[in-house]
Amino acid sequence: MIRLENVKKIFSKGTIDEKVAINGISLDIQQGDFITVIGSNGAGKTTILNLISGTCRPDEGDIFIDNSQVTTLPENQRAKFLGRIFQDPLMGTAATMTIEENLAMADLRGKKRGLRLGVSKSRRNHYRDILGGLELGLETRLKDSVSLLSGGQRQSLTLLMVTLTIPKLLLLDEHTAALDPKTAQRIIYLTKKIVEENNLTTIMITHNMQQAIKYGNRMIMLHEGRIQFDIKGEEKMALTVEDVVRRFGAELKDETLLGS
Amino acid sequence: MFRTIPISLEQGLAYGLVAIGIVITFRILAFPDLTVDGSFPLGAAVVARLITEGLTPIYGLIMAIICGFLAGCCTGVLNTKLKINSLLAGILMMTILYSVNLRIMGRSNIQLLTVNTLLTPLENLDINRFIPIIIFFFVVSFSMKFLTDTFMNTQIGFAMRATGDNEQMIRTLGVNTDNMTILGLGISNAFVALSGALVAQDQGFADVGMGIGMIVAGLASIIIGEALFGKKTVQRLTLAAIVGSVIYKLIISLGLRLGLAPTDLKMATGVMVILALGIPALKKEKEGKLHLRGV
């Protein structure tokens, strides 16, 4: 469904600071895949998501969505295919706008925007219903400014916004890393629920090896801009932390990966 | 003394449109746009030239709005497409507009006292001049306020507000933020040019130097208004702009009465803005947090 072909990304090309961030990656993502991505700092995890979402363009190689080439399509025109959540809970919502205004903007992801009223009455009822599902009491605070919410509440809202119109591909960039453990657990649970309910194709970057092993049907480890290993199916289901350490211990220099 | 209040109301309401324009750029788009100092006299120049050429004032007004819109769009293009820093883009357009305004007028000022303007019929009414003029500016500024409020509550308006709030987020939702910035700057400067066109007809002349210090005066107005109404919603921001503008004019005319030299006005306004921006910043620094949007 989404295909990367021999993609290469070099930052500061031709200067003394030249850095090869992605060094020839090919990846074929199937409909319904839930891929977890691990790798040490600078391995190219976030860059891969940036390339898929169009935040930056590859220096070599091509990217396809449903067999049509999107390599040079700007970020805002890929929006209708993609939903993305960042590590920073502040990045997914507009703080000075209200909860319902944020949801209404997400409702129109990738669609044409006109001079119609931003929040319609029928949608407002729908927003109230889905906010109720979060069990955070936000359903009574539709007209509250998002700046009044906590980081965890904002990330929950972001998750809801991203999945309001079902994206072809959901990109999660360590979206629980900036939250306290309890909230992170909640968000991860919500993510799993939403992904399963909607059969979403998902890529989730995580710093947490156990998370990467527990969730998803496929796990990829990046190292210095290359795919170090790619485990899927049965093998992925049976995988344990010990397996990974035994087989790839040499590459796992970054101890943070082993933290729980 | 009894003339101070009607004069401040008249001028405050007329300049209130400038303040609404500045709210759109500085507050909603978080874009410190300095084009204003050039687009204000641009509106005046266009309307003055067209009226003296014998065209109807309404036509002149419409042309002034269009010219202001285009001037703002130019600043937007400089910033988004040519990647010129927002402040510099505004300064460049402001400087270019100085020459453009002289070209439009053919000289540095045009007097409009002897020709028929949009306000002439109101001034010829058999009542105190202030009453119809103040009503006129009240209606104009509040209709523009409601127009802005309504627009900012549409789907495009949401996208524009989000562009100023969280550009990355609204781009991932499929909005071309460059276009939003250009459109917002256009609308803002259309308001400013409209204000310039009305002020020229009200005071009876257009002058190439009439825009100097317009941004600082507008900012002062907004800051005064926000102290009263807060800045939580767009409705409050635009209300703050108009009311703040009237109070600002009132303070200025009181200052003049108390012996402030007219030549010191801009300095006094500047100091006012510095204090208003500086004091909360110093207070916040103690808390270890500093967050200023736009200004």
Image (cartoon, coloured by chain):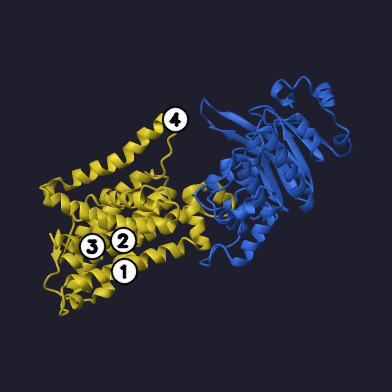
Residue under label 2, please give it. Answer: B17
Which amino acid, mark 2?
Leu
Query: In front here: A40 or A90?
Result: A90
Q: Give the distance between the C-alpha atoms of the residues marked 1 and 2, in whole angstroms.
A: 9 Å
Q: Give the distance between the C-alpha atoms of the residues marked 4 and 1, in whole angstroms.
A: 43 Å
The residue under the point 59% across, 41% down is A150
Quarter holding residue A85: top right
- As displayed, is residue B14 above or below residue A12? below
What letter labels the chain drawn in blue? Answer: A
Q: Is residue B45 left or right of residue B285?
A: left
Q: Extreme bottom residue here?
A: B126
Evaluate whether label 3 is on the same chain as label 1.
Answer: yes
Evaluate whether label 4 is on the same chain as label 2.
Answer: yes
Which amino acid, mark 3?
Leu
Residue under label 3, please give it. Answer: B9
Label whose residue precedes the other's in the sequence (4 or 2): 2
- Which structural element holds mark 1? helix
Q: Which mark is residue B140?
A: 1
Please report contact status of discs 1 and 2: CB closer than 8 Å, yes or no: yes
Q: Give the distance between the C-alpha atoms of the residues marked 3 and 2, in whole angstroms.
A: 13 Å
